[in-house]
Image (cartoon, rainbow, N blue to C red):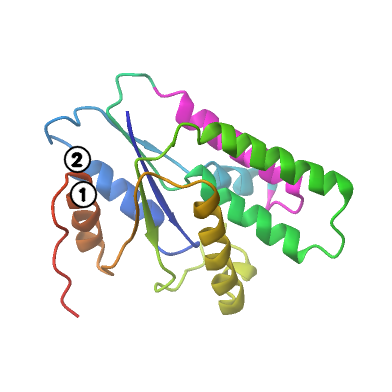
Amino acid sequence: MLRIGISGLPGTGKSCLARGLSTAFIGVNGFENVEYTAEYARHYIAKYGPPKEIYEQFRIIRKQQEWEDVLPEEISLMITDCPLPMNLAYVLDMRDRKEDVSLKDQMMISDIVSMLSKANYPTRYDFMFHLPPVVSPKKDGVRIDLHFEEEWRQTMEGHFSTSFDMFPSKRLEVVVPLNHEDRVLFCRDIVLGKEPIEIIS
């Protein structure tokens, strides 16, 4: 099974790209069975509210992994808009914003790192496509006020970089195009081993 992760801040277009890319592979030779694995965190937030404690992030990551691992062997391509290493960035952010990081918090962070290490051995994702924060987010009932703060968004980009360094994919690409259709073609061509489309600025 080939695994593709779409990463980026809230509102950058991860879900649209993941779904569009899933559709783009329909009928492509060698990709007869394509599966889109949704973001468990959205389900969690809609049901329980935004996570406030690190142990909640542990559950979110574990459930996200379960959603990926339950796929049958017949699936040729899995695309997710919530790759596991991306979740570590939110753990690091929560740690940094807490006034007091307890021993229990530190233990839980250690457990999360251990869980991600096991999940990424051997390397879990064949391709990681990262969407830079060039698109402004929109309120959707799930995103919180923090997600709209420019300082937070820049800090999170640093956390993403740390997460991808700790748990690398086989290939990491920053998605250059802004247009949705061009983004889909850009990622599809890279997966198929072609030169990505030329971007005209």
Image location (x, y in percent) of residue 30: 16, 29
Range of magenta residues: 49-71
The amino acid pointed to by label 2 is Phe
Does 179 sit left or right of 142 as displayed? left
In the image, is residue 37 above or below residue 90?
above
The amino acid pointed to by label 1 is Arg
Image location (x, y in percent) of residue 112: 67, 41
Asked if the residue under mark 2 is in contact with the one under mark 1, i.e. CB atoms within 8 Å, the reply is yes
Taking the view exactly as shown, the residue that stands out farthest to the bottom is: 201
The residue under the point 55% across, 73% down is 154
Q: In what element is the residue under mark 1?
A: helix
Image location (x, y in percent) of residue 196: 17, 59
Does 183 sit left or right of 148 as displayed? left
In the image, is residue 171 above or below residue 10?
above
Badge number at residue 5 = none
- The chief SS type of the magenta part is helix
Label 2: how many residues lie within 10 Å, few (<14), some (14-19) or many (20+)?
Answer: some
- Number of callouts in the render? 2
Does 150 sit left or right of 70 as displayed? right
Q: Earlier in the sequence, mark 1 or mark 2?
A: 2
The residue under the point 81% across, 48% down is 105
Which residue in the protein does label 1 denote? 188
The residue under the point 27% across, 42% down is 22
Q: Residue 140 colored magenta? A: no
Label 1 vs label 2: CA separation? 8 Å
Residue 132 sits in quarter:
bottom left
Does 15 sit left or right of 148 as displayed? left
Residue 26 sits in quarter:
top left
Which residue in the protein does label 2 denote? 25
